[in-house]
């Protein structure tokens, strides 16, 4: 083992959360569930004693920082940031990937963090340090095998698919994910057992929420792979970038590194490969031998091994890490609201329910979505690239359109029902108005009939008031219908007045 850092890796697992208790505060419930194993990290604003925190404070806009961290004195934080008590810089722990053929990768754990956005979006991150493995193909294997959380598919002979390791082990606790399990005989959870052990017993996986009382149900927003961030320090690769960029960007290795492949590139068409590499590569510092790459499931950097590049490593697990977390939270938020929208019953649910959903969506969008997060030029460009390659703007616009369309449909349905109710009430009122006028007319001839006139007017008023009360209970705010009822009440009072004066 060397003191030199050959690469840094961050595996990121985003998911949504819910609880089967309407009156429960999800954020408070989660905080209680995490108290034994996780420490809530609160930071001071512009903390000059911690240069990493201070640099972040200066780098990001104020509104953006509130969406990234928990601050002291903030009684309504948007984000809660936890760090696992066993896995941090104070304890020397390891993330061990046992690959087949008796090969394994042992990476030092810098920390394991758990970010919670608005009490419903969670991201667990494994921040790892590699000071043992320098070969470029070993870096590919660490990324590919280390990010898997469950089998993508099961083979008929129960052999392990080639992209799975035998197991992943977290030291200090019995947190092991064995991919050698006979999955024909056990239920497959869509979340690694290793992750569930970190969270604790109060969390459950993707079950019908009605049957999971007092459990926090989590649902992953990605497939069998965690999002990968990797910074690879290599003078050889940096030299290839610096002195042969045109050839290098089309070489197989950059494509495999960028799209987290191992033995071969998953794109076997040269024209398409050239296009996707150009769309997902950031070239600003290529003359220095530095390339950035961003895809829907990776954020990759290659630099040389200089001290300046080590400084970039600090930015990698601070500023760039925070940007990726924020965009993953945005993506999770969009998928969560899309899921809520799919559960709307067009025949039974009311416009009020959609209004509440839309209000909640706008609140989340205000808190988490930003068109720009920093005034720094490279940060602007990288954040824009993240948004584009994860198609955040497109999905936000589509979600708004879907909400608007469903809301308009439900409103039309409600208006049709209201018009039908208006028609019924109008007919009912007409039935009382005509007899009342007849009674009043007859009362001019026969004095005792004034009493009947009074009774009819009072009855009309009472029926109209009862109808208004019924509409209020059913949350019907139709102005036209209320105006008709007010008119009927006025007519009833007028008829009763005639009866009294007569």
Image (cartoon, helix red, strand yellow):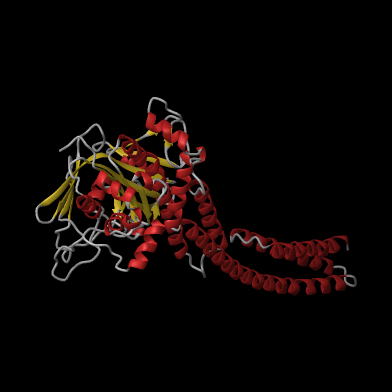
Q: Quarter of the image holding residue 57? A: top left
Which of the two residues, 206 or 377, is positioned nearer the viewer here?
377
Q: Residue at x 23, y 66 (%)?
A: 153
Point out residue 308 in the picture as x, y percentages from the top left corner.
Answer: 34, 36
Whole-percent x, y for residue 224 in the image: 28, 59
Q: Count the labels in the image.
A: 0
Residue at 14%, 63% (x, y): give it: 182
Residue lying furthest front: 243
Q: Tell me if residue 435 comes above or below residue 225 in the rendering.
A: below
**Image quadrant where one finds the N terminus:** top left
- Residue sitting at 34 percent across and 60 percent down? 208
Q: Is residue 145 visible?
A: yes
Give the farthest residue toward the right.
445
Residue 78 position, x and y percent, is: 46, 42
Q: Nearer the viewer, residue 141 or 419?
A: 141
Left or right: 428, with 76 as reference point: right
- Quarter of the image for residue 427 reads bottom right
Instruction: Give the answer, above or below, for where 455 lies relative to 167.
Output: below
Q: Is residue 302 left or right of residue 361?
A: left
Of residue 46 and residue 196, the one placed in the foreground of this image is 46
- Quadrant containing the C terminus is bottom right
Task: Give the image location of residue 212, x and y in percent.
Answer: 32, 55
Query: Could you tell whether 161 is left or right of 356 in the image?
Result: left
Is residue 24 shown to the viewer in this render? no
Outermost top residue: 49
């Amino acid at each position: 083992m060397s003191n030199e850092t050959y690469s840094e890796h961050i595996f990121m697992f985003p998911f949504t959360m819910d609880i089967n208790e309407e009156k429960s505060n999800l954020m408070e419930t989660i905080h209680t569930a995490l108290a034994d194993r996780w420490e809530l990290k609160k930071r001071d604003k512009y903390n000059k004693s911690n240069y990493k925190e201070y640099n972040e404070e200066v780098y990001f806009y104020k509104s953006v920082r509130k969406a990234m961290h928990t601050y002291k004195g903030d009684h309504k934080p948007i984000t809660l940031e936890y760090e696992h008590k066993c896995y941090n810089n104070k304890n020397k722990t390891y993330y061990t990937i046992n690959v087949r053929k008796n090969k394994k990768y042992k990476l030092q754990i810098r920390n394991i963090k758990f970010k919670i956005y608005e009490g419903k979006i969670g991201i667990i991150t494994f921040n790892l340090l590699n000071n043992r493995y320098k070969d470029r193909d070993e870096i590919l294997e660490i990324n590919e095998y280390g990010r898997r959380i469950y089998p993508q598919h099961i083979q008929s002979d129960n052999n392990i698919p080639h992209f799975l390791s035998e197991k992943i082990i977290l030291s200090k606790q019995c947190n092991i994910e064995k991919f050698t399990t006979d999955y024909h005989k056990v239920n497959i959870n869509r979340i690694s057992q290793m992750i569930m052990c970190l969270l604790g017993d109060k969390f459950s996986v993707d079950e019908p929420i009605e049957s999971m009382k007092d459990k926090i149900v989590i649902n992953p927003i990605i497939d069998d792979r965690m999002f990968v961030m990797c910074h690879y320090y290599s003078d050889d690769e940096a030299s290839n970038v610096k002195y042969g960029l045109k050839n290098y960007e089309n070489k197989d290795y950059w494509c495999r590194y960028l799209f987290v492949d191992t033995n071969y590139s998953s794109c076997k068409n040269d024209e398409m490969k050239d296009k996707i590499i150009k769309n997902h590569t950031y070239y600003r510092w290529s003359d220095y031998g530095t390339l950035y790459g961003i895809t829907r499931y990776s954020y990759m950097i290659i630099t040389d091994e200089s001290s300046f590049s080590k400084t970039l490593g600090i930015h990698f697990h601070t500023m760039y890490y925070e940007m990726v977390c924020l965009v993953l939270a945005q993506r999770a938020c969009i998928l969560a609201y899309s899921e809520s929208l799919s559960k709307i019953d067009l025949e039974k649910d009311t416009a009020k329910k959609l209004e509440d959903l839309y209000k909640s969506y706008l609140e989340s969008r205000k808190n988490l979505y930003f068109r720009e997060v920093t005034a720094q030029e490279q940060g602007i460009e990288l954040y824009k690239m993240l948004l584009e390659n994860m198609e955040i703007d497109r999905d936000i616009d589509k979600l708004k359109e879907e909400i608007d369309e469903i809301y308009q449909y439900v409103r039309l349905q409600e208006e049709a029902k209201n018009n039908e109710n208006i028609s019924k009430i109008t007919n009912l009122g007409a039935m009382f108005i005509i007899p009342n006028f007849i009674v009043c007319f007859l009362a001019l001839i026969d004095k005792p009939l004034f009493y009947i006139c009074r009774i009819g007017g009072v009855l009309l008023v009472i029926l109209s008031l009862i109808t208004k009360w019924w509409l209020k209970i059913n949350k019907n705010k139709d102005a036209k219908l209320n105006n008709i009822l007010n008119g009927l009440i006025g007519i009833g009072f007028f008829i009763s007045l005639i009866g009294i004066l007569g």
